[in-house]
Image (cartoon, rainbow, N blue to C red):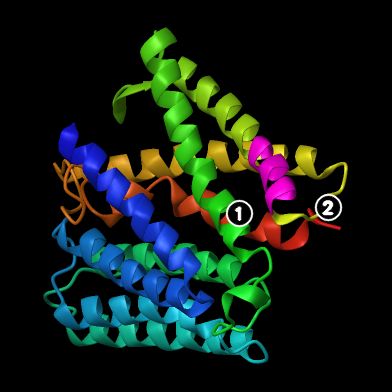
Amino acid sequence: MKTRIITGLVLVVLLAVILLLPPIATVVAASLVAAIAVWEAVRATHIGNHLGQLIVSMLMAAAGPFLLLQYKYGLTLTVLAVLVYVIAMAVMQIAAHEKVKIETTGYTMMMTLIIAVVFTCVAKLRLDGVDPLAPFATLQHGRYLILIALFIPWLADIGAYFAGVAFGKHKLCPTISPKKTVEGLIGGLIFSPLVITATLYAYQLHANVFVYSYSYWLLAGTAFVGSVLSVFGDLFASVIKRQHGLKDFGNVFPGHGGILDRFDSFLFALPIVALILDYIPLFK
């Protein structure tokens, strides 16, 4: 437990430092973390046995956040990158069809694209329409938006843990994640929206900005949707680990496991939250 707490504090400090730097630092960090996550997803399960496919997949995940730096051609470059990646994976599958099963290629591609989308969304929120090299004084709301997206799944996890410990009686998915309970799920779905909406009020005071009167309801709804999806991401990762006899995907974070073990609840929640935050008007 001591190691887990120390690692958690170090990660919080590291996140704060990255967010205090120009946006390009978040883009670089998201790229690096995405590549490591793909490595874990493929190597931990022993599904991927083709080095070329692994390398191409890591490059695809790492490239995602950087594609956003091209505002004018970002979408075109992203579509092109995905097409090149899919074709490259197909060519390697054909060349190594006697050794590599199509299921292997399919799993690697699925995890790569999911991970690439997640960390590309992280970079997108941080940029928030500003120059990636912009200094502190010119930044808009990118820091706050990225914290919302990160905290919604984490707060849902925290609320679910304590509600489960205090009231948990009915198992949610005992064959996948025996410790999860229905009571814990409800606790997370309540705790995350409440805390997230409180942060909007605090941010309004600290940043001296004005929010629309309905922003709190919009943000609470976003947190609720993100919290629900975070549970599916967690369970999805648990299915993969359970079917392959894994406790953790990796050991990058002492006491916490690997990248995917810390970000599994983000797999489906963060992209949806990022899309919602990109379109709903919070600030006047």
Front position in the image: 242 or 190: 190
Q: Residue at x 65, y 71 (%)?
A: 128
Q: Which residue, given by chain and number where applicable, does mark 1 sit on?
A: 272
Label 2: which secondary element:
loop
Q: Is residue 14 magenta?
A: no
Nearer mark to the viewer, of 1 and 2? 2
Give residue 46's quadrant in the image: bottom left
- Residue 105, position as x, y percentages in the image: 28, 70
Question: Disc 1 or 2, which lies upstream in sequence?
Answer: 2
Mark 2 and mark 1 in contact (Cβ < 8 Å)? no
Instruction: Give the amino acid at mark 1.
Output: Ile
Q: Quadrant of the N terminus?
A: top left
Q: Quadrant of residue 57?
A: bottom left
Point out the stretch of residues depicted in magenta: 197-206
Q: Is residue 23 visible?
A: yes
Tell me if 77 is positioned left or right of 233 in this view.
right
Q: Is residue 166 above or below residue 279?
A: above
Instruction: Give residue 210's mark.
Output: 2
Mark number for residue 134?
none
